Image (spheres, rainbow, N blue to C red):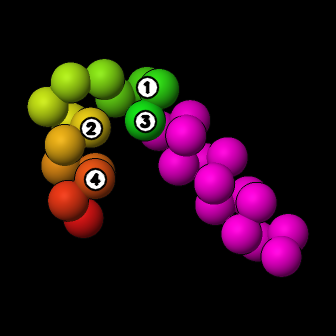
Amino acid sequence: MIGLILILIFYFTVVRHYSGSSYVSVAQE
């Protein structure tokens, strides 16, 4: 459960960092 939360936090951090075309690449992957 804790791992899931960490993944979500990490994912949102990456999304905030990469705004634009990079976001699409991350979403497709």
Contact between marks 1 and 4 (CB within 8 A): the answer is no
Which class describes the residues within 10 Å of circle 1: few (<14), some (14-19), or many (20+)? few
Contact between marks 4 and 2 (CB within 8 A): the answer is yes
Contact between marks 2 and 3 (CB within 8 A): the answer is yes
The amino acid at mark 2 is Tyr
Disc 1 to disc 3, C-alpha distance: 5 Å
Residue 22, image quadrant? top left
Q: Nearer the viewer, residue 24 or 14?
A: 24
Q: Which residue is mark 2?
A: 23
Position of the N terminus by quadrant: bottom right
Q: Which residue is mark 1?
A: 17
Q: Earlier in the sequence, mark 2 or mark 1?
A: 1
Image location of residue 16, percent across then percent down: 47, 26
Q: Which residue is mark 3?
A: 15
Disc 2 to disc 1, C-alpha distance: 9 Å
Disc 3 to disc 4, C-alpha distance: 9 Å
Q: For the residue labelled by badge 4, is the local secondary structure a helix, a strand or a loop? A: helix
Q: For the residue labelled by badge 3, is the local secondary structure a helix, a strand or a loop? A: helix
Disc 2 to disc 3, C-alpha distance: 6 Å
